[in-house]
Amino acid sequence: MKRNVSIALMSTLFMLSALTLAWALKVGTQAPDFTGTDSKGQQQSLAQYRGKYVVLEWHNQNCPFVRKQYQSGNMEGLQRKWTAKNVVWLSIISSGPGQDGSVTPEQESAYLAKMHAAPTAVIFDPTGKIGHMYEAKTTPHMFVIDPKGKLIYEGAIDDQPTPDPAGVKGSKNYVDAALTEDMNGEPVLQPVTRPYGCSVKYGD
C-alpha cells in the first residue's frame, strides 16, 4: 500500500515538473504581455510597444550590482544609445512592500534624475506578478524582445559578475550584443546567460 502511494506521489511530482518546464519562459517564444503603472502614474503594457524592440531591466537602486552599472554610467549609456534607435527600455521594480528596493515613485524619479538615467519608463510591480511571469531572479536581470514580440535574449547584462564598477570596462555586454546582432539580421550568438546580482526581493 505504501509503495503504491509513493509511486503515485512520484508520478504526480513528475507531471508537475513536466508542466512547469512546458510553461517555462524560453528564448524564441512569445514574451508574455503585462500591464503596470509607471513612476509617472501612467499605464504601461508590453502590447502597446508591439513592432518595436523592448528591453526589460529588473531594477533595485539599493543593489550593489545595480549601482555598479549606474555609477559607472554604463546602464544610462545603454539606455540613451538604444532609446535613440527607437528601442523601448522598461525598468521594472518587483520589490514587495517593505522589502529592500521598494521605493516611492518620487524616490525613484529622484534617483533617475541623479543618475541621468533614460529608460522609457519605470514600472512598479509590488505584487511581483510581472517578475514571476518572467521568472526574474536578480537585479539586474535583462530581457530583450523583438518587434514580433518574441524573446531573443535573457540573462545577465554582461560577463563580469562583480559589484565593482571597474568591472564594466572591457566587459562583454550581452544586451548590446543581442540588439546589434538581431537588428543586423544575424543570429544572437548568446541568447541565454546566467543572470547575476542581488535576488529580486519579492513580497511573497
Image: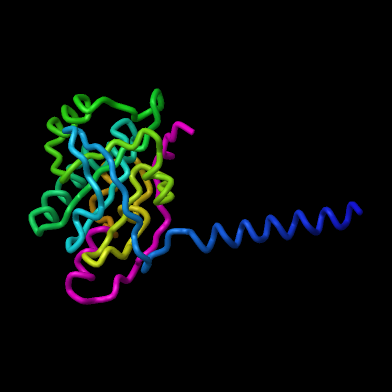
From this viewpoint, which residue is outermost toward the left?
A: 84
Against 6, residue 137 (above or below) is: above
Query: Which residue shows up at 76% across the image and 54% down it?
Result: 9
Q: Is residue 55 magenta?
A: no
Residue 51 lies in quadrant: bottom left
Nearest the camera: 92 or 71? Answer: 92
Residue 103, position as x, y percentages in the image = 29, 26
Q: Is residue 5 above or below residue 189?
A: above
Which residue is depicted at the point 48% across and 59% down? 24
Quadrant in the picture for the N terminus: bottom right
Q: Is residue 108 above or below residue 12?
A: above
| Residue 156 point in image, percent of width and height | 35, 53
* Magenta segment main secondary structure: loop
The reply, left or right, for residue 168 in relation to residue 29 is left
Q: In the rendering, at what x and y percent does residue 101 appear?
A: 34, 30
* Magenta span of residues: 175-204
**Drawn side of residue 107 relative to residue 153, left or right:** left
Q: Residue at x 29, y 42 (%)?
A: 92
Tell me the quarter of the picture where residue 118 sits: top left
Asked which colour scheme the image uses, the reply is rainbow
Image location (x, y in percent) of residue 159: 34, 56
- Residue positioned 19% across, 66% down in the render: 180
The outermost residue toward the right is 1
Q: Nearer the viewer, residue 154 or 134?
A: 134
